[in-house]
DNA sequence: AGCACGCCGACT
DNA sequence: GTCGGCGTGCTC
């Protein structure tokens, strides 16, 4: 019995495939093991996800060739979680399963081509032909991956010539074990935190903690709404309660920097029972963390979104902090959203889920309030506020009032942070004579001017072009820069404050994590007193200044998206976190040409209630989440015509399957690739799941799915 | 992701 | 005339 096995491969395949299970493997077959099986012409390692005797989908099945594990690598709960996630996002089930495992040494190796001694001699002796010699001299410097020659870096014939050199014995392939360079974790600043004492008697925190405790064994979703320190205190107490009854807690935080105060609190309050995962751990440390989890009957494990897949057999509580942070969504590799995953895991394990934020998503806030699980932890604290400065009558990039405040702050010895809305010098060039705007030849979007590197760069595909000396269309002498970026801001500041020590913070001036950290250290130490950055700066933890300036955040509204208002609210509140809480003279200024916009006004005051009131009304009127479940489906690949046709087919299928409403198709771009996007709405997430399941299989194209409900 | 099958330009 | 480029489609 049980003669069939379903296998999910870590490839761009959404479904699992059915194989026959030969007699000799039946005893050893169980879900969660890795297996070898033929797929097309090759043999691939996949995950056995189900053993059954249902009627097979095809007459002649291929057999399972081998079972690689003697015990399940992936527990049943994680199989189910990854299955549901892959279904929701139409991403690879096997791909999600692979991301549930620690990276194995085998997957860290890569193939390189290198010159043999004979090859070296041939190169030196000049007996190689032109192309052969070119490739051989490249390899003489260092080993290169065969893929390197497939790309356009060398001539088109690269792979063929490489194959010839290989046959002649001048080149050999070598397996290289990848060693990933890791740096030491920056030490946590030793501020003694006394969380437990600070808020011990606080009735709000008390109420939240006991509400969660009362939900033990039920997958209730709470929203802890309030400032970081109070949330931290409440989390800590909830976690301690869960550990006290011998169960585990899972704490998910956004990719960039968990607050030092929180890790300190967990570490000092729980010692060995607090396990931290983050991107800088070595494989060895990762293994060590897993061993500790196996050994500790009750522990809290804190990590970014991939920690969602850790096996935690005694799970008692899940927390997702900064729940409106989009880095909970994984977009490279198999797509999944850790917030949706946390909801599924909480349901599956029947444990409460706490979402936390001081600027939560409209959906979460509405749901928590509707279910009576909104825990308001604001505790009479006043949020940081920014003064609004109208720039509609200002001729210059930086309003005069702004320059005055910066000057005053610098004279008073305060540090200043300025958030510019975009990268580069100008978002496009403009010919005042004929209206010409230089566009990217590949994707038609306007090219950004970078003055420092004196080039035009496409924001979509990275294509570069030289800056034209005159208008290529009408010969006009000047092309005007429009849409000021951080380089222009930096230039203005340098002119206005020649004595100040000033730095720009963007991907160009600080390309690596190391250089970014160095720059921030110099700012923190006072070596730099004026820092101008792109939104990238708002995503660095621990930036503190006495004067914080938000320059024209309204550009975030340019995206036609039902979440544009929410994104702007979250982004403004995030930038205002740079206000130094220990500086009594600290202030913030928001320069905008939309001084009366309700979201800008609410965000500047930190008045979430006002923001939510307006936003929920807009969502209700137009039938957006939380009043409907919504999917954005993008199709990729092929020419515009074919894509358009496929989108029409998909739209028809979605309609036939019962979608309440379909918007689009609309053209979309990502990383220089063109695609089309459809938006489908349905009454609930469950109904939308069914509709997508019916409709998506019918369309042959690369798809990406985003979901909101 | 591979790997195959399918149609248009430079070569033994 | 073919060799071979990569565009699209399939893998139980």
Image (tube, coloured by chain):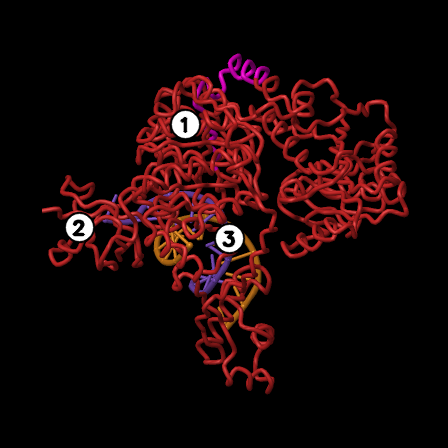
Chain colours: A red, B orange, C purple
Residue A581 found in image quarter: top right
Discs 1, 3 touching: Cβ within 8 Å: no
Magenta segment boundaries in residue numbering: A613-635
Q: Which residue is mark 2?
A: A20
Whether the magenta-drawn stretch holds residue A255 is answered as no
Q: CA distance from mark 1 to mark 2?
A: 52 Å
The answer to which of marks 1 and 2 sits earlier in the sequence is 2
Circle 1 sits in a helix, a strand or a loop, which is it?
A: helix
In the rendered view, tell whether residue A160 sits above or below residue A251.
Answer: below
Q: Are marks 1 and 2 on the same chain?
A: yes
Q: Which residue is mark 3?
A: A279
Q: Chain of mark 3?
A: A
Residue A301 visible in the snapshot: yes
Q: CA distance from mark 3 to mark 2?
A: 39 Å
Circle 2 sits in a helix, a strand or a loop, which is it?
A: strand
Q: Which residue is mark 1?
A: A210
Residue A637 visible in the snapshot: no
Task: Give the image location of residue B8, x and y in percent.
Answer: 52, 50
Task: Give the image location of residue A396, x and y in percent.
Answer: 86, 32
Count numbered badges in the picture.
3
In the rendered view, tell whether residue A598 sits above or below residue A558.
Answer: above
Q: Residue at x 86, y 34 (%)?
A: A403
Q: Are marks 1 and 3 on the same chain?
A: yes
Mark 3 or mark 2, which is nearer to you? 3
Q: Foreground residue, A25 or A55?
A: A25
Q: Going by the image, does A462 lie left or right of A319? A: right
Q: Foreground residue, A255 or A88?
A: A255
Q: Which mark is residue A635?
A: none
Circle 3 sits in a helix, a strand or a loop, which is it?
A: loop
């Amino acid at each position: 019995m049980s003669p069939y096995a379903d296998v999910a491969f870590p490839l761009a395949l959404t479904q699992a495939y059915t194989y026959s299970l030969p007699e000799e493997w039946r005893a050893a077959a169980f879900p969660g093991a890795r297996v070898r099986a033929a797929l097309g012409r090759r043999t691939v390692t996949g995950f056995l996800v189900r053993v059954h005797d249902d009627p097979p989908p095809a007459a002649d099945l291929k057999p399972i060739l081998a079972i690689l594990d003697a015990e399940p690598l992936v527990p049943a709960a994680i199989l189910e979680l990854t299955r549901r996630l892959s279904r929701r996002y139409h991403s690879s089930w096997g791909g999600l399963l692979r991301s549930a495992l620690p990276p194995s040494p085998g997957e860290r190796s890569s193939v390189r081509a290198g010159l043999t001694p004979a090859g070296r001699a041939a190169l030196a002796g000049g007996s190689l032909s032109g192309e052969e010699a070119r490739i051989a001299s490249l390899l003489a410097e260092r080993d290169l991956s065969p893929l390197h020659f497939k790309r356009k870096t060398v001539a088109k014939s690269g792979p063929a010539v490489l194959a010839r050199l290989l046959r002649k014995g001048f080149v050999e392939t070598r397996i290289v074990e990848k060693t990933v360079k890791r740096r030491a974790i920056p030490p946590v600043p030793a501020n003694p935190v006394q969380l437990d004492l600070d808020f011990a008697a606080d009735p709000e925190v008390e109420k939240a903690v006991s509400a969660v405790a009362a939900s033990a064994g039920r997958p209730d979703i709470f929203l802890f709404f309030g400032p970081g320190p109070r949330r931290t205190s409440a989390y800590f107490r909830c976690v301690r309660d869960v550990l006290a009854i011998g169960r585990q807690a899972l704490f998910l935080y956004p990719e960039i920097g968990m607050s030092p105060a929180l890790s300190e609190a967990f570490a000092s309050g729980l010692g060995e029972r607090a396990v931290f995962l983050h991107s800088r751990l070595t494989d060895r440390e990762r293994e060590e963390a897993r061993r500790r989890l196996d050994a500790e009957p009750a522990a809290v494990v804190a990590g970014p979104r991939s920690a969602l897949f850790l096996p935690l057999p005694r799970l008692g509580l899940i927390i997702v902090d900064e729940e409106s942070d989009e880095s909970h969504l994984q977009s490279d590799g198999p797509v999944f959203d850790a917030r949706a995953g946390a909801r599924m895991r909480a349901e599956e394990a029947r444990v409460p889920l706490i979402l936390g934020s001081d600027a939560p998503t409209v959906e979460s806030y509405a749901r928590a309030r509707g279910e009576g699980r909104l825990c308001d932890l604001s505790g009479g604290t006043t949020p940081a506020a920014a003064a609004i400065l109208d720039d509609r009558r200002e001729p210059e990039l930086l309003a005069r009032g702004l320059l005055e405040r910066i000057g005053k702050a610098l004279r008073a010895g305060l540090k200043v942070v300025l958030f510019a809305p975009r990268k580069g010098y100008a978002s496009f060039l403009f010919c005042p004579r004929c209206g010409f705007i230089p566009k990217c030849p590949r994707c038609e979007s306007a090219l950004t001017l970078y003055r420092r590197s004196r080039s035009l760069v496409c924001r979509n595909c990275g294509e570069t072009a030289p800056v034209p000396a005159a208008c290529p269309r009408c010969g006009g002498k000047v092309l005007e820069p429009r849409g000021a970026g951080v380089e222009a801001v930096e230039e203005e500041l340098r002119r206005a404050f020649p004595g100040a020590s000033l730095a720009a913070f963007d991907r160009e001036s600080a390309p690596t994590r190391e250089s970014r950290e160095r720059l921030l250290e110099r700012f923190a130490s006072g070596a730099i007193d004026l820092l101008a950055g792109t939104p990238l700066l708002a995503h660095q933890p621990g930036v503190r200044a006495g004067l914080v300036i938000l320059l024209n955040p309204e550009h975030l509204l340019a995206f036609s998206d039902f979440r544009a208002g929410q994104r702007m609210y979250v982004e403004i509140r995030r930038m205002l976190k740079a206000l130094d809480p220990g500086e009594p003279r600290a202030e913030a200024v928001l320069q905008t040409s939309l001084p009366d916009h309700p979201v800008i006004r609410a965000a500047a005051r930190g008045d979430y209630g006002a923001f939510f009131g307006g936003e929920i009304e807009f969502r209700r009127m137009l039938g957006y989440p939380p009043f409907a479940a919504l999917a954005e489906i993008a199709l990729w690949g092929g020419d515009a015509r074919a894509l358009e046709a496929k989108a029409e087919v998909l739209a028809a299928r979605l309609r036939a399957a019962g979608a309440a409403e379909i918007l689009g198709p609309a053209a979309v771009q990502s990383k220089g690739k063109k695609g089309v996007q459809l938006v489908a709405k349905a009454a609930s997430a469950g109904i939308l799941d069914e509709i997508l399941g019916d409709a998506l299989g019918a369309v042959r194209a690369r798809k990406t799915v985003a979901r909101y409900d």
